[in-house]
Amino acid sequence: MKKYVCVECGYIYDPEVGDSSQGIPKGIPLEDLPYDWVCPICGEPTDVFEELN
């Protein structure tokens, strides 16, 4: 699965880990996160995330 980085703070969203701080189980790709999900570090929405190469 693709990993994504927040361009504001550098947080890496890894779908294989999910985001336990917001109740996101592992296996959820960035594009399938709830509309109100935000970066757990800086609070930015998913549109500031870029795919890691």
Image (tube, helix red, strand yellow):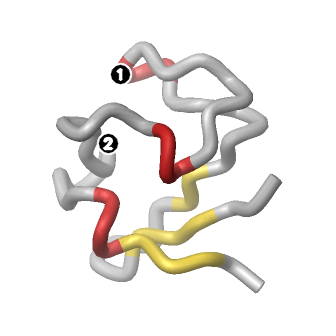
Image quadrant for the C terminus? bottom right
- Identify which residue is drawn at 20% across, 60% down: 44
Residue named by callout 2: 40
- Badge 1, how many Cα within 10 Å: few under 14, some, many 20+? few
Which element is circle 2 on? loop
Where residue 12 is drawn, which disc sits there?
none
Q: Quadrant of residue 26?
A: top right
> In this image, 29 relative to 33: left or right?
right
Verify CB contact (< 8 Å) between mark 2 and mark 1: yes
Above or below: residue 26 compared with residue 14: above
Q: Secondary structure at mark 1?
A: helix
Q: Is residue 53 left or right of residue 12?
A: right
Q: Residue 17: x percent and y percent? A: 70, 33
Q: Residue at x 17, y 51 (%)?
A: 43
Amino acid type at circle 1 is: Gln
With 1 as the anchor, is 15 left or right in this view? left
Q: Which label belongs to residue 22?
A: 1
